[in-house]
Image (cartoon, coloured by chain):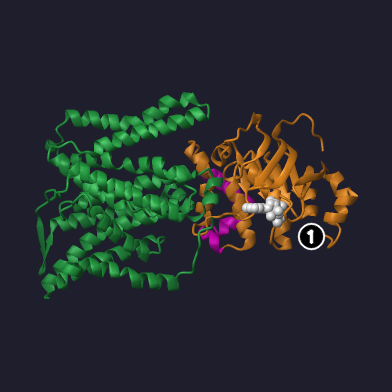
Amino acid sequence: MDLQIALLLGQDGITNGAIYALLSLALVLVFTVTRVIFIPQGEFVAFGALTLASLQAGKLPGTLWLLIALAIAAAAVDIVCALRDGQAQRIPKVLAVNCALPAALAALLSIVPAASLPLALQVVLTLALVVPLGPLLYRLVFQPIAEASVLVLLIVSVSVHVTLSGLALYFFGAEGSRTPAFTDATFEIGDALIQGQTLLVVCASFTLIAALYFFFERTLWGKALRATAMNRTGARLMGISATSAGKLSFSLAALIGAFSGVLISPITTIYYDSGFLIGLKGFVGAIFGGMASYPLAAAGAILVGLLESYSSFWASAYKEVIVFTLIIPVLVWRSLTTRHTEEEE
Amino acid sequence: MQAGDKPTILEVSDLSVSYGKVEALHGIALKIRAGEIVTVIGPNGAGKTTLLSALMGLLPARGDIVYLGQRQGAEREVESLVRQGMTLVPEKRELFGEMSVEDNLLLGAFDRYRAGQRDHAETMAQVFDTFPRLRERRTQLAGTLSGGERQMLAMGRALMARPKLLMLDEPSLGLAPLIIKEIFRIVAELKKTGVSILLVEQNARAALAVADYGYVLETGEVSLEGPSGELANDPRVIESYLGLGGRH
Ligand SMILES: Nc1ncnc2c1ncn2[C@@H]1O[C@H](COP(=O)(O)OP(=O)(O)OP(=O)(O)O)[C@@H](O)[C@H]1O
Ligand SMILES: [Mg+2]
């Protein structure tokens, strides 16, 4: 391997690694706040990429139907709860909160030809379609079992993953999609040829990571999420409800997932089930950070990207094997070095 | 102390709380008036923490709870009680250990902030005046504080919510005598700001000295109650709680 190839592979590795890093942050966030190991994280990537591809192909993405169905279900559940508490006057608000966005999106998509919109607007539409699925899933699936054990939450999480990838197959079909590159620009720095696309993905990922850092360190809601992750009882006593913290963390995870999908779609062909492997690589990064440390998780994820990229050069058939075998020494190292902080239940 | 015409903040009657099949509190009655310090004293395992947890909505309870003139339904929730000005400083403090002192305090004002009140800077300045030690430690992580400082932070964080009813669960637990003295001095001072305080303590002497009214809780039942001056002179209290060891 000469330097040129090494640099090229390094570029690839960092590009993918940046996306894995985003996903690993989402996994750490959701786990620390809600104790859910969010296996469907990858499905948000696939839904993001495939929804964008359908919009660009001039098709109505099935995501809209899923969004409408979940919104109606959530509204129904909220109405039942309101009636049970004798708060019938809350019903109009419940309907408005749950159904306004899906209705607006449905109307918009039936009038405006999404395929002819500029890319930026298509991305915004994609996010508007995919991101609300996060809090809706939390409301319908995880909020009712918020007090369950980590294992039960994991099992439910796996079934949500299976359901979502089944729906993706139904909505988008078995053939993969790849969206056109955001840019064709290339830059030459010394010997290395850097693609504008790569630069864009890396910049966008790091911007989002920086934005998340700002959110967690500087805003009250960000601090409230961290507080919930550190001490659930303490947070409740401050009036931070576990439900709003859970919804917020799922919204952020969905945003990160969908955004990653948009970023990755011009680089890799995405199939209805591609999300799982991508999410899993973010998961390896998250395990690096012991499911708790954001910087370690991000560093681990970038390492995964690099490792994957170089191993695809030497032993392309085994690249997944190599990446996932990495989990074992990492787990051994983690279990030897971290003191065990068992969840008090 | 004069009682009579001051409005009642919290009135509880026939309150029972169970852990699974085991009942820990059996039909408690208790009353707190505006601006009063009421103390609940009792030995280990009497049910003091259980009482405060139930009042705060952390545990399901049977019986009547009337807070600020409103009967509380079965679906009482911590978050809505916080919004109505009830605040608990729990026995275990429950601080956010990996956050700075300042951030812990800020989160104490979370609910007020969400409701649109942006006076947390001012409130924090008042808290720092009450606990100058916290001002010195403002950037330090809560997890690295000493026991006394942790208690001060827990109380400061609760005050950030500008509570109407402040409930303190054994604020003197595990602290050195000098710090205990300081904490009780501050409790007495807080009374001047008009907040009502429900103070749970094993340190009966100090608690009765600052309180207006007291209850003795034993094995899940109120065995004795009265104005704290009278309780402090009651032979049964003296024998069980004030007798040995002299001044705490
Ligand atoms: N989570 C729990 N599950 C079962 N029983 C409990 C639980 N917490 C407390 N108890 C029991 O309820 C009774 C009252 O406990 P509680 O903690 O309220 O007492 P306390 O007066 O606060 O004691 P201390 O002074 O030691 O803090 C005790 O018998 C205790 O064993
Ligand atoms: Mg106790």
Residue B1 falls left or right of residue A48: right
Classify residue A124 as left or right of residue A97.
left
- The part of the chain drawn in magenta is B121-144
| Residue A36 x %, y % | 41, 52
Task: Tell me if mark 1 has few (under 14), some (14-19) or many (20+) residues whose alpha carbon lies within 10 angstroms of its own.
Answer: some
The residue identified by callout 1 is B248
Is A337 displayed left or right of B16 in the figure? left
Mark 1 — on which chain does it sit?
A: B
Q: Residue at x 79, y 34 (%)?
A: B3
Number of marks in the rendered image: 1
Q: Residue furthest bottom?
A: A1
Rendered-image quadrant of the N terminus of chain A: bottom left
Q: Tell me the quarter of the picture where residue B5 sits.
A: top right
Residue B114, visible in the rendered structure: yes
Residue shown at 26%/39% (left/top)? Answer: A129
Percent across and percent down for residue A174 are: 16, 48
Q: Position of residue A146 (x, y in %)?
A: 47, 47
Q: Main secondary structure of the magenta part?
A: helix
**Which chain identifier belongs to the orange chain?**
B
Residue B171 seen in this snapshot: no
Taking A214 as reference, is B191 above or below it? above
- Measured as percent of width and height from the top left, residue B82 is found at 57, 40
* Chain coloured green here: A
Q: Is residue A222 above or below residue A283?
A: above
Q: Is mark 1 within 8 Å of ligand 1?
A: no
Left-right relation of B148 to A215:
right
Nearer the observer, A289 or B182: A289
Q: From the viewer's side, name the closer residue of A144 and B166.
A: A144
Q: Please identify the quarter of the rendering in which residue A194 is found.
A: bottom left
